[in-house]
Image (spheres, helix red, strand yellow):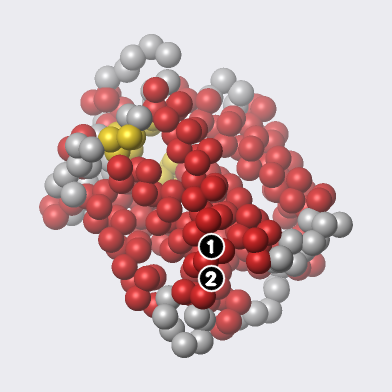
C-alpha cells in the first residue's frame, strides 16, 4: 500500500464538537476509564450480579481478543488504519498502542454488561419472530456489500466476516439468545457512537484512529465510519457466542 500523509486523512474527519480537555496524550485512557469504571462499580449490583459471570466471561473475551489484535496488527502494518501519537501513550505492542490492545478487553466487558442488564430488567425477546429475517437478511446484505466493495479492504473484510458469521450462527445454533443479543446491540450502539466518536476525532482536533481513505467507504455517522458499527457487531457477537458456549447457553440445531 502506498504511504499516505496522516494529515491528509485527518482533514477528512467531521468534527461534532471540540472539547479542549481531550487535547492530551491521555485521551485514549480517558475512553477506557469512562467505559470501564462505571460498569465495574455496577457489576456488584444485587440484582444483575454481573461479577458472577467474570469467571467464564473474561476467558471468552481474551480468546476472542487474540484474533482481533492480530487483525489490528496486520491492518496497521498495511496502513489500512493507524494511530495518532498525540492522543495515546508511547508504549506499544507490535505497533499497537497499549490502549488499543485493552480496547478488546474493556469494550466487550462493558458492552455485554448492557446485555445482562436487559436480561434482568427486560427479559422479553421482542425480536424472536424476526430471527431469520435479521440473521439471513442482514447477514446476506452485509456479504453483498462486502463483495461490491471488494477493493476496500476494511469494508470488504468486516462486512464479509460479520455477514458470514450471522448466517452461520443462525444455521448452526438455536435461538437461545441470538435475537436478545441483536436487541442489546441496538442499545449498545448508542454509547458505542459516543466512545467511537472520540476515537475517530468527533470531539478533538484530530482523531486517535486514522483510516486510509482508500480502504473504507467513508460513510460516517457523526465521525464514526459505518464499518466500525459492523466491526463492533462482529466483535461483540463473537464474545457473546463464546461466553454462552462456556456457560452452556449454545444449543446446536
Q: At 39% across and 70% down in the image, what residue appears?
A: 39
In the figure, is residue 86 to the left or right of 198?
left
Look at the picture and state if 220 lies above or below 56: above
Q: In the figure, is residue 214 to the left or right of 122? A: left
What residue lies at 42% left-to-right and 30% top-to-bottom?
73
Kindly identify which residue carries mark 1: 57
Percent of width and height locating residue 219? 47, 38
Q: Nearer the viewer, residue 226 or 32?
A: 32
Classify mark 2: helix, strand or loop. Answer: helix
Q: How many marks?
A: 2
Q: Position of residue 115 (x, y in %)?
A: 55, 69
Circle 1 — which element?
helix
Tag 2 residue: 53
Q: Gap in Å between the C-alphas at discs 1 and 2?
A: 6 Å
Quarter of the image with the N terminus is top left
Q: Are marks 1 and 2 in contact (CB under 8 Å)?
A: yes
Amino acid at each position: 500500500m502506498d504511504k499516505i500523509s496522516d494529515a491528509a486523512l485527518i482533514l477528512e474527519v467531521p468534527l461534532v464538537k471540540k472539547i479542549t480537555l481531550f487535547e492530551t496524550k491521555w485521551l485514549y485512557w480517558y475512553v477506557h476509564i469512562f467505559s470501564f469504571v462505571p460498569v465495574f462499580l455496577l457489576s456488584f449490583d444485587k440484582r444483575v450480579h454481573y461479577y458472577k459471570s467474570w469467571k467464564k466471561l473474561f476467558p471468552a473475551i481474551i480468546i476472542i481478543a487474540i484474533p482481533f489484535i492480530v487483525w489490528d496488527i496486520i491492518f496497521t502494518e498495511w496502513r489500512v488504519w493507524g494511530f495518532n501519537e498525540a492522543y495515546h501513550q508511547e508504549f506499544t505492542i507490535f505497533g499497537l498502542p497499549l490502549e488499543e490492545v485493552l480496547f478488546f478487553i474493556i469494550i466487550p466487558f462493558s458492552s455485554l454488561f448492557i446485555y445482562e442488564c436487559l436480561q434482568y430488567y427486560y427479559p422479553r425477546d421482542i425480536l424472536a419472530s424476526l430471527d431469520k429475517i435479521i440473521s439471513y437478511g442482514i447477514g446476506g446484505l452485509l456479504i453483498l456489500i462486502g463483495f461490491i466493495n471488494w477493493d476496500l479492504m476494511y469494508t470488504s473484510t468486516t462486512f464479509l466476516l460479520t455477514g458470514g458469521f450471522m448466517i452461520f450462527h443462525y444455521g448452526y445454533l438455536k435461538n437461545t439468545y441470538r435475537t436478545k443479543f441483536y436487541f442489546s446491540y441496538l442499545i449498545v450502539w448508542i454509547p458505542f457512537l459516543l466512545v467511537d466518536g472520540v476515537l475517530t476525532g468527533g470531539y478533538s482536533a484530530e482523531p486517535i484512529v486514522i483510516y486510509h481513505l482508500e480502504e473504507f467507504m467513508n460513510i460516517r455517522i457523526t465521525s464514526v465510519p459505518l464499518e466500525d458499527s459492523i466491526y463492533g457487531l462482529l466483535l461483540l457477537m463473537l464474545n457473546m457466542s463464546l461466553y454462552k458456549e462456556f456457560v452452556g447457553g449454545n444449543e446446536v440445531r
